[in-house]
Amino acid sequence: MYMKLLAVVAALTLVICAPPSQAKPISLVERCYCRSTVNSLPRGYIRELRFIHTPNCPFQVIAKLKTNKEVCVNPEIRWLQQYRKNAINKMKKSKKGN
């Protein structure tokens, strides 16, 4: 009886004194930010764009609207593809100029 009580007290002490982990549960780490995307979004509504590419998720585009709401945008939209192409070309030109 005494040994069981001692084991329980030791286990509780270990749990209470152990430092909390800063890591996220694996189910949250592997989750993609965008679960659904918007297929039509006028460019005038957008304040900024963020591009996210993670190993576990496909390429994702998050648009922050002028209303401060964030929505996921389908990366296959024609104007968005042109925007990305222009941004890449601009980056290449600036690197050649340096």
Image (tube, rainbow, N blue to C red):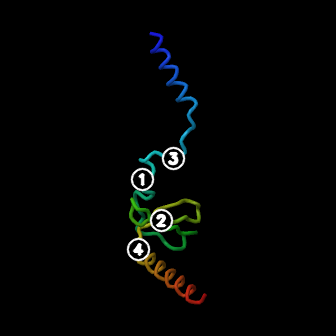
Q: Amino acid at mark 1?
A: Arg
Image mark for residue 23: 3
Label 4 crowd bin: few (<14), some (14–19), many (20+), radius 10 Å: few
What's the residue at 55%, 64% (across, down)? 64
Q: Residue 6: x, y in percent?
A: 50, 17
Question: In the picture shown, does residue 54 fall above or below 98?
Answer: above
User: Does label 3 or label 4 sit earlier along the sequence?
Assistant: 3
What's the mark number on residue 31? Answer: 1
Gap in angstroms between the C-alphas marked 4 and 1: 23 Å
The circle on residue 52 is 2
Q: Are marks 3 and 4 in contact (CB under 8 Å)?
A: no
Amino acid type of the residue that numbered disc 2 sits on in the rendered structure: Ile
Real-space Cα distance between discs 3 and 4? 35 Å
Would you place residue 70 above or below residue 17 in this image?
Answer: below
Q: Residue at x 52, y 22 (%)?
A: 10
Q: Residue furthest front?
A: 3
Task: Decide: few, some or many residues near mark 2? Use Cα within 10 Å; few <14, some 14-19, many ≥20.
Answer: some
Dot 3: what SS?
A: loop
Are there few (<14), some (14-19), or many (20+) residues within 10 Å of tag 1? few
Per the model, the C-alpha gap separating discs 2 and 3 is: 21 Å
**Of circles 3 and 1, which is in front?**
3
Residue placed under numbered mark 4 in the picture? 77
Give SS at disc 2.
strand
**Mark before the other along the chain sequence, 2 or 3:** 3
Residue drawn at x 55%, y 45% as measured from the top left: 22
Labels 2 & 1 near each other (Cβ < 8 A): no
